[in-house]
Image (cartoon, helix red, strand yellow):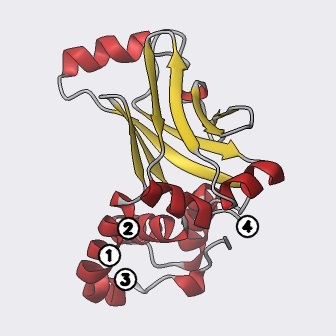
Amino acid sequence: MTALTRADLLSLERYAVERPAFRARVIAHKKRRQLALGAHLTLCFEDRLTIQYQVQEMLRIERIFEPGGIDDELAAYNPLIPDGRNWKATLLLEYPDVDERRAALSGLVGIETRVWFEVAGHARVYAIADEDLERSRADKTSSVHFLRFELDAPMVGALRTGAALSAGVDHPAYAAAIEVGAGLREALLADLA
Protein backbone atom coordinates (compact mmCIF):
# COMPACT_ATOMS: atom_id res chain seq x y z
CA MET A 1 0.00 0.00 0.00
CA THR A 2 1.24 3.44 -0.77
CA ALA A 3 1.88 6.09 1.85
CA LEU A 4 -0.56 8.92 2.32
CA THR A 5 0.34 12.38 1.05
CA ARG A 6 -1.23 15.79 1.59
CA ALA A 7 -3.08 15.27 -1.72
CA ASP A 8 -4.97 12.33 -0.13
CA LEU A 9 -6.36 14.47 2.68
CA LEU A 10 -9.36 16.76 2.81
CA SER A 11 -9.15 20.34 4.02
CA LEU A 12 -10.57 20.93 7.49
CA GLU A 13 -13.64 22.62 5.99
CA ARG A 14 -14.32 19.85 3.47
CA TYR A 15 -13.69 17.17 6.10
CA ALA A 16 -16.25 18.80 8.39
CA VAL A 17 -18.87 18.36 5.67
CA GLU A 18 -17.87 14.84 4.62
CA ARG A 19 -16.95 13.53 8.09
CA PRO A 20 -20.26 11.83 9.02
CA ALA A 21 -20.36 9.67 5.89
CA PHE A 22 -16.59 9.02 5.93
CA ARG A 23 -16.67 8.12 9.62
CA ALA A 24 -19.56 5.66 9.11
CA ARG A 25 -17.68 4.04 6.22
CA VAL A 26 -14.49 3.68 8.27
CA ILE A 27 -16.30 2.30 11.34
CA ALA A 28 -17.93 -0.41 9.18
CA HIS A 29 -14.55 -1.11 7.54
CA LYS A 30 -12.80 -1.38 10.93
CA LYS A 31 -15.36 -3.87 12.27
CA ARG A 32 -14.30 -6.31 9.57
CA ARG A 33 -10.63 -5.84 10.53
CA GLN A 34 -10.75 -6.78 14.23
CA LEU A 35 -9.74 -9.98 15.94
CA ALA A 36 -10.49 -10.82 19.57
CA LEU A 37 -7.90 -13.08 21.17
CA GLY A 38 -9.53 -14.11 24.40
CA ALA A 39 -11.69 -11.87 26.55
CA HIS A 40 -9.33 -8.92 26.94
CA LEU A 41 -7.09 -8.58 23.86
CA THR A 42 -8.22 -7.19 20.52
CA LEU A 43 -6.17 -6.63 17.38
CA CYS A 44 -7.35 -3.83 15.09
CA PHE A 45 -5.65 -4.21 11.70
CA GLU A 46 -4.63 -0.98 10.06
CA ASP A 47 -4.62 -0.15 6.38
CA ARG A 48 -4.51 2.96 4.25
CA LEU A 49 -8.17 3.84 4.94
CA THR A 50 -7.94 3.43 8.73
CA ILE A 51 -4.80 5.54 8.84
CA GLN A 52 -6.29 8.19 6.56
CA TYR A 53 -9.17 8.45 9.01
CA GLN A 54 -6.79 8.70 11.96
CA VAL A 55 -4.80 11.47 10.29
CA GLN A 56 -7.96 13.38 9.31
CA GLU A 57 -9.22 13.12 12.88
CA MET A 58 -5.92 14.35 14.33
CA LEU A 59 -5.87 17.29 11.94
CA ARG A 60 -9.47 18.10 12.92
CA ILE A 61 -8.94 17.78 16.68
CA GLU A 62 -5.67 19.71 16.68
CA ARG A 63 -6.89 22.22 14.06
CA ILE A 64 -3.79 21.58 11.96
CA PHE A 65 -3.88 23.18 8.52
CA GLU A 66 -0.32 24.32 7.86
CA PRO A 67 1.74 22.12 5.49
CA GLY A 68 4.49 21.44 8.06
CA GLY A 69 2.02 20.26 10.67
CA ILE A 70 0.22 18.05 8.16
CA ASP A 71 3.56 16.56 7.09
CA ASP A 72 4.38 15.81 10.74
CA GLU A 73 1.11 13.89 11.16
CA LEU A 74 1.74 11.97 7.94
CA ALA A 75 5.26 11.10 9.12
CA ALA A 76 3.86 9.82 12.43
CA TYR A 77 1.06 7.70 10.94
CA ASN A 78 2.32 6.47 7.55
CA PRO A 79 4.53 3.81 9.20
CA LEU A 80 1.31 2.13 10.42
CA ILE A 81 0.20 1.33 6.85
CA PRO A 82 1.15 -2.22 5.77
CA ASP A 83 3.69 -2.29 2.96
CA GLY A 84 2.50 -5.42 1.16
CA ARG A 85 4.74 -7.84 3.05
CA ASN A 86 3.25 -7.43 6.48
CA TRP A 87 0.22 -6.79 8.63
CA LYS A 88 0.10 -3.92 11.06
CA ALA A 89 -2.23 -3.85 14.01
CA THR A 90 -3.11 -1.89 17.08
CA LEU A 91 -3.24 -4.19 20.11
CA LEU A 92 -5.77 -3.18 22.76
CA LEU A 93 -5.80 -4.71 26.24
CA GLU A 94 -9.29 -4.01 27.55
CA TYR A 95 -10.29 -4.29 31.20
CA PRO A 96 -13.27 -2.08 32.13
CA ASP A 97 -12.55 -2.11 35.87
CA VAL A 98 -9.64 0.19 36.80
CA ASP A 99 -8.29 -2.05 39.58
CA GLU A 100 -8.54 -5.18 37.43
CA ARG A 101 -6.78 -3.33 34.56
CA ARG A 102 -3.96 -2.15 36.83
CA ALA A 103 -3.37 -5.69 38.15
CA ALA A 104 -3.62 -7.26 34.69
CA LEU A 105 -1.21 -4.82 33.05
CA SER A 106 1.38 -5.49 35.73
CA GLY A 107 1.16 -9.21 34.99
CA LEU A 108 1.22 -8.89 31.20
CA VAL A 109 4.64 -7.29 30.66
CA GLY A 110 5.97 -8.49 27.31
CA ILE A 111 2.61 -9.67 25.94
CA GLU A 112 3.07 -7.49 22.85
CA THR A 113 5.87 -9.78 21.60
CA ARG A 114 3.95 -13.00 22.33
CA VAL A 115 1.15 -12.41 19.80
CA TRP A 116 1.48 -14.66 16.75
CA PHE A 117 0.06 -15.72 13.41
CA GLU A 118 0.51 -19.09 11.80
CA VAL A 119 -0.09 -20.00 8.18
CA ALA A 120 -0.77 -23.76 8.02
CA GLY A 121 2.46 -25.59 7.24
CA HIS A 122 4.71 -22.67 8.21
CA ALA A 123 6.38 -21.43 11.38
CA ARG A 124 4.61 -18.96 13.61
CA VAL A 125 5.24 -15.28 12.99
CA TYR A 126 5.55 -13.29 16.21
CA ALA A 127 4.81 -9.58 16.47
CA ILE A 128 7.46 -6.93 16.21
CA ALA A 129 6.17 -4.38 18.69
CA ASP A 130 6.29 -0.66 19.37
CA GLU A 131 8.93 0.37 16.88
CA ASP A 132 8.16 4.04 17.43
CA LEU A 133 8.63 4.09 21.21
CA GLU A 134 8.73 1.78 24.22
CA ARG A 135 5.32 1.26 25.79
CA SER A 136 6.22 -1.19 28.56
CA ARG A 137 8.14 -0.85 31.78
CA ALA A 138 9.62 -3.59 33.92
CA ASP A 139 6.57 -3.50 36.20
CA LYS A 140 3.71 -2.77 33.77
CA THR A 141 2.74 -2.92 30.12
CA SER A 142 0.63 -0.39 28.26
CA SER A 143 -2.96 -1.09 27.28
CA VAL A 144 -2.12 -0.09 23.67
CA HIS A 145 0.69 -1.40 21.45
CA PHE A 146 1.48 -1.17 17.75
CA LEU A 147 2.44 -4.46 16.10
CA ARG A 148 3.93 -5.58 12.81
CA PHE A 149 3.80 -9.15 11.48
CA GLU A 150 6.26 -9.93 8.67
CA LEU A 151 5.30 -12.71 6.25
CA ASP A 152 7.62 -14.32 3.71
CA ALA A 153 6.71 -15.15 0.10
CA PRO A 154 5.97 -18.86 0.76
CA MET A 155 3.52 -17.89 3.52
CA VAL A 156 1.76 -15.41 1.26
CA GLY A 157 1.61 -17.99 -1.51
CA ALA A 158 0.14 -20.57 0.85
CA LEU A 159 -2.52 -18.09 2.00
CA ARG A 160 -3.41 -17.29 -1.60
CA THR A 161 -3.96 -20.98 -2.31
CA GLY A 162 -6.25 -21.43 0.70
CA ALA A 163 -3.99 -22.38 3.61
CA ALA A 164 -5.60 -21.94 7.01
CA LEU A 165 -4.59 -18.98 9.16
CA SER A 166 -4.58 -19.02 12.94
CA ALA A 167 -3.62 -16.45 15.54
CA GLY A 168 -2.94 -16.43 19.22
CA VAL A 169 -1.05 -15.31 22.28
CA ASP A 170 1.34 -17.47 24.29
CA HIS A 171 2.21 -15.23 27.24
CA PRO A 172 2.51 -17.06 30.59
CA ALA A 173 -0.34 -14.97 32.02
CA TYR A 174 -2.54 -14.89 28.91
CA ALA A 175 -3.06 -17.62 26.35
CA ALA A 176 -5.44 -17.71 23.42
CA ALA A 177 -5.63 -19.29 19.98
CA ILE A 178 -8.19 -18.94 17.21
CA GLU A 179 -8.71 -19.82 13.58
CA VAL A 180 -9.01 -16.57 11.61
CA GLY A 181 -12.44 -16.31 10.01
CA ALA A 182 -13.01 -15.92 6.29
CA GLY A 183 -13.91 -12.21 6.38
CA LEU A 184 -10.82 -11.08 8.27
CA ARG A 185 -8.63 -13.54 6.37
CA GLU A 186 -9.81 -11.98 3.10
CA ALA A 187 -9.13 -8.45 4.39
CA LEU A 188 -5.65 -9.42 5.56
CA LEU A 189 -4.88 -11.14 2.28
CA ALA A 190 -5.79 -7.92 0.46
CA ASP A 191 -3.10 -6.14 2.51
CA LEU A 192 -0.40 -8.36 0.97
CA ALA A 193 1.26 -7.66 -2.38
The residue under the point 59% across, 32% down is: 116
Judging depth in this view, the residue of 170 and 24 nearest the camera is 170
Quarter of the N terminus within the rendering: bottom right
Q: Residue at x 56, y 19 (%)?
A: 110
Locate residue 161: give its quadrant: bottom right
Residue tagged by mark 2?
29
Kindly identify the amino acid type of the residue bearing the numbered disc 4: Ala
Task: Residue 136: tell me if it is visible.
Answer: no
User: Looking at the rendering, which quadrant does residue 13 occupy?
Assistant: bottom left
**Picture layout, residue 127 above or below residue 111:** below
Residue 180, numbered circle:
none
Disc number placed over residue 193 in the picture, else none: 4
Q: Do the residues labelled 2 and 4 touch (CB within 8 Å)?
A: no
Instruction: Give the residue number, with chain letter if any, for mark 1.
Output: 25
Give me the C-alpha separation between circle 2 and circle 3. 22 Å
Q: Position of residue 178 (x, y in %)?
A: 45, 35
Q: Could you classify mark 3 by the number of other residues whose Cα lies within 10 Å: few (under 14), some (14-19), or many (20 or more)?
A: some
**Residue at the spot 43% in from the left edge and 64% down from the top edge:** 54
| Residue at the farthest left position | 97
Which residue in the structure is indicated by mark 3?
12
Q: Which secondary structure lies at badge 3?
A: helix
Disc 3/disc 1 C-alpha distance (Å): 18 Å
Classify 10 Å Cα crowding around label 1: few (below 14), some (14-19), many (20 and above).
Answer: few
Q: Earlier in the sequence, mark 3 or mark 1?
A: 3
